[in-house]
Amino acid sequence: MGQLEGKTAIITGAARGIGKAIAELFAEEGANLVLVDMDEDSLNEVAGEFNAEPVIADISDEKQSVSAVEKAFGKFGSLEILVNNAGITRDGLAIRMKPEDFDAVLSVNLKGPFLMSRAAARYMMKARYGKIVNMSSVVGIMGNAGQANYAASKGGLIALTKTLSKELGGRGIRVNAIAPGFIETEMTRRLSEAAVENFLSKVILGRTFGKPVDVAQAALFLSSPASDYITGIVLPVDGGMLIT
Ligand code: NAP
């Protein structure tokens, strides 16, 4: 039997990259899947591949996030798992960064998980069981030149994770974060050669990039009963980058 058999899971940003890899693994583990993204064509394709329910929504919009969670519950009649994976970058040095780019990144990467988590928590609290997994980043811990907005959003997401774990733990809801290092996806393909070399030099497991499935395995652990006594943690999936 799959580790997520009978459980309903929402995964945001599931049309590609890490979110898609999580969807694939969760499908193998028997979850009822609801995949949320803004990229309609890719989302429909991925949902078809994994027999999942696609929901087109912008998670940074309150109405759309609440409606996405309601659709998930309405379709499957329960909601045990929320993976807040959707995220964006708008890189640039702080002194040149447009305030709109700061707001846009904070809105998707931090406000989005806040809105989705509280919409999901309403159902999870009633059931006295839930797992929320927030996709942070090592740069939310270390900072990163050129990513003031992104690093602040991911650091904020860690603080949100710890706060929600304290507010919701008494109702059986576990809230944890993952801090990926450098994972090969569309997002990292946009980085400069110098930034890539800087990240690679810090990976102590043989200077290799991580794969989306490496992060998906951590998301599975934090979503499955195997981690039922764990809440409020930040699990790095970074090839050792954080300790260099
Ligand atoms: P990705 O390939 O860019 O995929 C992100 C997905 O999220 C896209 O399909 C995107 O759709 C969707 N999305 C963006 N804004 C959204 C919104 N407002 N509402 C709904 N969906 C939205 O990124 P990734 O590399 O897989 O990253 C996934 C997560 O891991 C992100 O939170 C990222 O910050 C985090 N992370 C990644 C790395 C890495 O090395 N790749 C490292 C640390 C942390 P559109 O195409 O329509 O924008």
Image: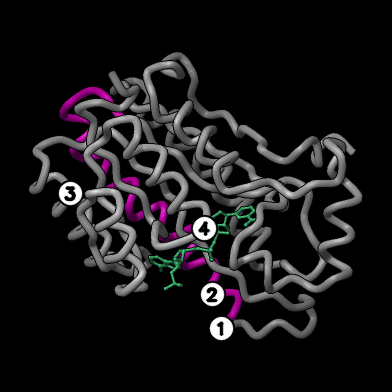
Q: Secondary structure at mark 2?
A: helix
Mark 4: amino acid: Gly
For disc 3, the marked residue is 72
Boundaries of the magenta span: 101-130
Mark 1: amino acid: Glu
- Rate crowding at label 4 as few (under 14), some (14 to 19) or many (20 or more) other CA atoms within 10 Å: some
Mark closer to the chain start, 3 or 4? 4
> How was this image coloured?
one colour
Q: Is residue 91 above or below residue 11?
A: below
Q: Is residue 2 above or below residue 215?
A: above
Mark closer to the chain start, 2 or 4? 4
Mark 2: amino acid: Asp
Is residue 231 a member of the stretch shown in magenta? no
Residues tagged 2 and 1 counted as in contact (Cβ below 8 A): yes
Instruction: Decide which of 112, 76 is in the foreground and name it.
Output: 76
Mark closer to the chain start, 3 or 2? 3
Assess mark 4: CB under 8 A from ligand 1? yes
* Inter-mark Cα distance, 2 to 4: 23 Å
* Inter-mark Cα distance, 3 to 2: 28 Å
For disc 4, the marked residue is 17
* Inter-mark Cα distance, 3 to 4: 22 Å
For disc 2, the marked residue is 103
- x, y percent for residue 113: 41, 53
On-image quarter of the N terminus: top left
Q: Is residue 56 left or right of residue 142?
A: left
- x, y percent for residue 224: 39, 24
Mark closer to the chain start, 1 or 4? 4
For disc 1, the marked residue is 100
* Inter-mark Cα distance, 1 to 4: 25 Å
* Inter-mark Cα distance, 2 to 1: 5 Å
- Rate crowding at label 3 as few (under 14), some (14 to 19) or many (20 or more) other CA atoms within 10 Å: many
